[in-house]
């Protein structure tokens, strides 16, 4: 019988962080929640093995990402998410800046979005991203560069007044483009 | 690394983290355990059901076929012994005959083996999409349950991959087959 305490502790310390990362990758909070939870369920079914992994969080993140991009799972998750969303109270308002960022991220291809999140949010190196995504370092670099390039003009499309764009000034856009 | 992008992404992740509505770990563990139990139970039921079905419907006694206990299942109209429309259609469509099922019983095949065989034959022929679906579902069983000799024996009976797939797909329960045997 796998140790439930270990699992519970692991879940308590990592689940919300992973939802945040998945949300940045998918652009849909409900979908991210469902994918992450499903990944934890699968982890529990293999817990004796996964428990010994060096980076269990990466395993969950990878599985959750695969679940979220899988077409069938996507459809199912959307349905579940829809049900959940209709059951629960309304989500707190997302700020215009974050909304614009989500929208911009959703416009770039999934593989690019994934490496951007892994690099800039999770803080993984090119090699680590390569190991997690199964892509060669050159591909990771290319996706990163293309993703940033694609993101730069998209984040400039703001409708809100400039005063509220604390993060997305012209200088920021330039930084993103040239990073 | 641009700090601004990191900051913005962190803000996004922070929003998600603080607003995520997650189940408790206990609930997730229970779901995982229930799912695993269902899978194990389903596989066992499939195995017992088809094996018993093969034995009972053909009237052939075989040591590997669990018969008596399951064969006494009552066959009332409301009982689960009746074949569903789906099962009937699946078997009818595949033209599975009693003689063919008898061949399976003689060889002492279990449902797992039938599923495995469905997988192999479908993968070999690559013709039947339905069988291929079964094949994918049953993948992994073959290596564990089916010997090459058994496979040859079964294929020698002339069963088509679609028929084998239908047997695996019908998921007949012991009660259903007992009822069938009683006519």
Image (spheres, coloured by chain):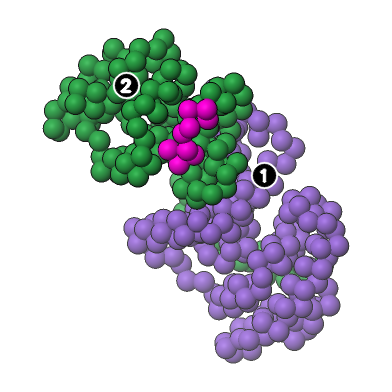
Chain colours: A purple, B green
- Chain bearing tag 2 is B
Closer to us: A32 or B135? B135
Q: Is residue A38 visible?
A: no
Question: Residue drawn at (42%, 23%), measured in percent from left and top?
Answer: B103
Residue linked to disc 1: A59
Q: Residues in magenta?
A: B155-163
* Image disc number at residue A122: none
Tag 2's secondary structure? helix
Quadrant in the picture for residue B168: top left
Q: Looking at the picture, how far across and down is residue A150, in whole percent?
A: 72, 78
Q: Looking at the picture, how far across and down is residue A19, in whole percent?
A: 57, 55
Closer to us: A174 or B131? B131
Tag 1's secondary structure? helix
Task: Residue at the far top: name it.
Answer: B63
Q: Are marks 2 and 1 in contact (CB under 8 Å)?
A: no
Question: Residue drawn at (26%, 18%), measured in percent from left and top?
Answer: B71
Question: Residue drawn at (36%, 35%), measured in percent from left and top?
Answer: B96
Quadrant in the picture for residue B47: top left
**In the displayed structure image, the side of residue A110 where residue B62 appears, left or right:** left
Inspect the magenta stretch and tell me whether residue A41 lies in it.
no
Report crowding for label 2: few under 14, some 14 to 19, many 20 or more residues within 10 A (C-alpha).
many
């Amino acid at each position: 019988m796998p140790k439930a305490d270990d699992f519970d502790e692991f879940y308590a310390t990592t689940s919300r962080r992973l939802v945040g990362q998945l949300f940045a990758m998918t652009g849909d909070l409900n979908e991210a929640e469902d994918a992450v939870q499903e990944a934890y369920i699968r982890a529990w079914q293999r817990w004796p093995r996964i428990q010994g992994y060096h980076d269990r969080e990466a395993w969950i993140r990878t599985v959750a990402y695969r679940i979220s991009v899988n077409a069938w799972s996507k459809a199912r998750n959307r349905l579940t998410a829809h049900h959940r969303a209709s059951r629960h109270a309304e989500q707190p308002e997302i700020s215009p800046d974050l909304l614009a960022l989500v929208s911009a991220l959703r416009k770039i291809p999934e593989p690019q979005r994934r490496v951007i999140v892994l690099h800039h949010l999770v803080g993984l190196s090119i090699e680590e991203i390569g190991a997690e995504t199964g892509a060669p370092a050159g591909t990771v670099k290319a996706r990163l560069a293309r993703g940033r390039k694609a993101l730069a003009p998209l984040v400039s499309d703001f409708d809100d007044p400039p005063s509220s764009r604390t993060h997305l000034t012209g200088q920021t856009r330039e930084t993103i483009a040239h990073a | 690394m641009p700090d601004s992008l990191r900051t913005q992404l962190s803000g996004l992740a922070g929003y998600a983290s603080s607003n995520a509505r997650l189940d408790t770990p206990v609930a997730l563990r229970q779901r995982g355990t229930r799912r695993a139990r269902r899978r194990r139970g389903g596989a066992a039921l499939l195995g017992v059901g088809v094996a018993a079905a093969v034995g009972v419907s053909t009237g052939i006694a075989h040591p590997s076929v669990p018969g008596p206990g399951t064969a006494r299942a009552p066959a009332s109209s409301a009982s689960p012994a009746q074949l569903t429309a789906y099962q009937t259609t699946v078997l009818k469509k595949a033209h599975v005959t009693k003689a063919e099922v008898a061949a399976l019983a003689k060889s002492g095949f279990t449902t797992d083996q039938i599923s495995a065989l469905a997988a192999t034959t479908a993968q070999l022929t690559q013709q039947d999409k339905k069988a291929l679906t079964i094949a994918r579902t049953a993948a992994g069983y073959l290596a564990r349950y089916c010997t090459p000799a058994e496979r040859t024996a079964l294929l020698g009976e002339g069963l088509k991959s679609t028929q084998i797939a239908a047997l695996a797909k019908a998921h007949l329960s012991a009660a259903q087959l007992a009822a069938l045997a009683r006519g």
